[in-house]
Amino acid sequence: MLVLTRLSQVLIDRSIAATNVIMGWFDQMMAQPNLNCICIKWGTLYPTEHVNRLFRAVLRNTERPVNFFCMTEDAVGLDPHIKVLPLVDQPFEPRMRAAQKTATKKNGALRKIAMFRPGLLGDIDGPVLAFDIDILITGNLDEMADYAPCKVAMRGPFTNRSEPPTYGEGSVIKFEPKHHAFLYDEMANDPEGSVKMCKGSEQTYTSTLATQNEAIALYPDAWIVSFKFHCRPKRPMNLFVPPKLPKDARIVCFHGRPKVDEALEGFKSNPFHLTRPAQWISDNWR
């Protein structure tokens, strides 16, 4: 009987200890600030599943509860845990589009400025990570959200030959609604002047305004990389050697071709512009 009593006490003690561990983990999770993320999808260039994959990648790369928003005119097929924001024309868009007709960049990316609209995310005024859909998340995002409080955070230009010139890359932008309403208000107040200033480029617009307002901070280059410039081997080694993921990369940007799914399978635009299959993409894009 004494043995059974001691065994029962041991089991009770272990159960209490396990419960305390679980409750401690739960309390720690509840004490964490939310990770707030947003993307925008219009048209048919990227399928809905790309947004779902982006959402799942966010969940895999944070220790925090997630608020994930998608601005879109077509929410069919989106994961039900994604918070949908209707994508409608902003009051300034007719004038903005008219100005873009004579701009260097005419691909419509200035629609992304709608993500900066004050009040869009309700009472959220802390850090928000704005993602392009054509990225691959490969590392922890929490430090990116906490980086440079009260600043707009972007990665510096991938090259010094970008046209129009830019202070930062726009594939990932950390902003805080409480401090950065100027990212929306400037375009709303002067669409023609804003488009002329940035030559139709969203990343030039965002990074220039942040710089002018002394509100820009640059992420470490190693955190955000270009698939073309930092993963794919230089010619002629690209013909034989598969792309590699830099060890400190948290975001891989796929600007132009190949897109994420093309890089996974391998891509060939001509005999010399060839990309070997990058199998590591499948671990991060699912």
Image (cartoon, helix red, strand yellow):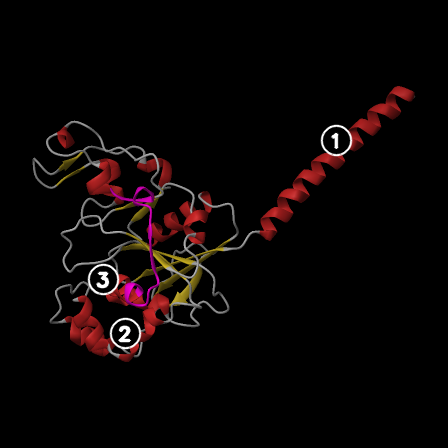
Chain part drawn in magenta? 210-226
Q: Quadrant of the N terminus?
A: top right
Q: Is residue 193 above or below residue 152?
A: below
Amino acid at dot 1: Arg
Q: State yes or no: residue 224 in magenta.
A: yes
What residue is drawn where x is 27% and y is 74%?
Answer: 187
Q: Which residue is mark 1?
A: 14
Percent across and percent down for residue 196 are 16, 72
In the rendered structure, find residue 113 and report the number of the disc placed on it.
none
Percent across and percent down for residue 225 are 28, 43
Sequence order check: which comes first, mark 3 or mark 2? 2
Of helix, strand and loop, which one carries label 3? helix
Which residue ends up furthest to the right in the rendered image?
1
Q: Which residue is mark 2?
A: 187
Horizontal arrangement in the rendering, residue 127 relative to residue 105 (left or right) = right
Amino acid at dot 3: Thr
Percent across and percent down for residue 10 are 80, 27
Q: Quadrant of the C terminus?
A: top left
What residue is drawn where x is 32% and y is 68%?
Answer: 213
What residue is drawn where x is 46% and y is 47%?
Answer: 59
What residue is drawn where x is 60% and y is 52%?
Answer: 31
Q: What's the distance in space between the residues labelled 3 and 1, CA to CA?
A: 58 Å
Circle 1 Cα neighbour tier, 10 Å, few/some/many (<14 / 14–19 / ≥20) = few
Sequence order check: which comes first, mark 3 or mark 1? 1
Q: What's the distance in space between the residues labelled 3 and 2, CA to CA?
A: 13 Å
In the rendered structure, find residue 204 and report the number of the disc placed on it.
3
Q: Is residue 281 above or below residue 104?
A: above
Amino acid at dot 2: Met
Q: What's the distance in space between the residues labelled 2 and 1, CA to CA?
A: 61 Å
